[in-house]
Amino acid sequence: MLAQPEPGPPATWRRRPQSVLFACTLNTVRSPMAEALARHYFGREIYFASAGLKRGEPNSFAMATMEEIGIDLTRHKPHTFEDLEDSNFDVIVTLSPEAHHRALEFTRTMAVKVIYWPTPDPTAVQGSRETMLDAYRDVRDRLAARIKAFLSPGTGSGP
């Protein structure tokens, strides 16, 4: 009897990442949103963390837009790369140009894949509260779609 191949990640992946770090500038909007979304969808399968170049203050618009979809960001504490207890990630997804440069520097002696996902900074949007919330929703929804496409078996184009 021939052995059947074990089910696994899509053929486009060498191997599915077991740990992913999301990085942005202040670790208050984009990267914590990405971390929370990824944990929501894949938290039992993959380890996720987030970090920034600098430690910012928690952002109420980010919290509000994540709460709209049932994800609580109120416990998130902003971290820097230096705060990370473990730097052994399979993939670092950077969400701002500054974070991308820092991640490349951070990993120059490591076998880590660094991926850049250009993501707009919703804190730069001016206008009414609703206009600002729409900018945060757009970032949230873009990140959710990208994370699902990247990590879902059968649809991903992972590392």
Image (cartoon, rainbow, N blue to C red):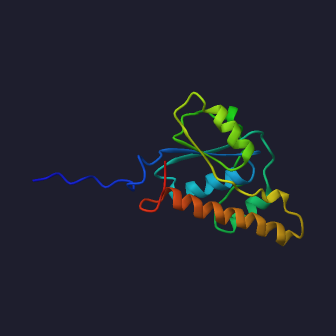
Q: Residue furthest right?
A: 127
Picture quadrant of residue 127: bottom right
Residue in view at x 75 percent, y 63 percent? 136
Query: What residue is shown at x 81% (from left), y 47% (from top)?
Result: 57
Looking at this rendering, what residue extends furthest in the top direction? 109
* Of 28 and 118, the residue lying toward us: 118
| Above or below: residue 145 compared with residue 111 | below
- Percent across and percent down for residue 134 are 77, 69
In the image, what residue occupies the spot 51% across and 41% down? Answer: 90
Numbered marks: total:
0
Q: How far across and down, in percent of the image, does residue 35 sit?
A: 62, 51
Asked if one can make out residue 78 in the rendered structure from this viewpoint, the answer is no
Res 19 visible: yes
Is 121 situated left or right of 159 in this image?
right
The residue lying at 56 percent from left, 54 percent from top is: 39
Q: Taking 130 as reference, is 87 left or right?
A: left
Q: Nearer the viewer, residue 20 or 12?
A: 12
Q: 66 or 118, which lies in front?
A: 118
Q: Position of residue 7 (x, y in %)?
A: 31, 55
Q: Position of residue 86 (x, y in %)?
A: 58, 33
Query: Which quadrant holds residue 126?
Result: bottom right
| The quadrant where residue 38 appears | bottom right
Q: State whether residue 109 is above or below residue 25.
A: above
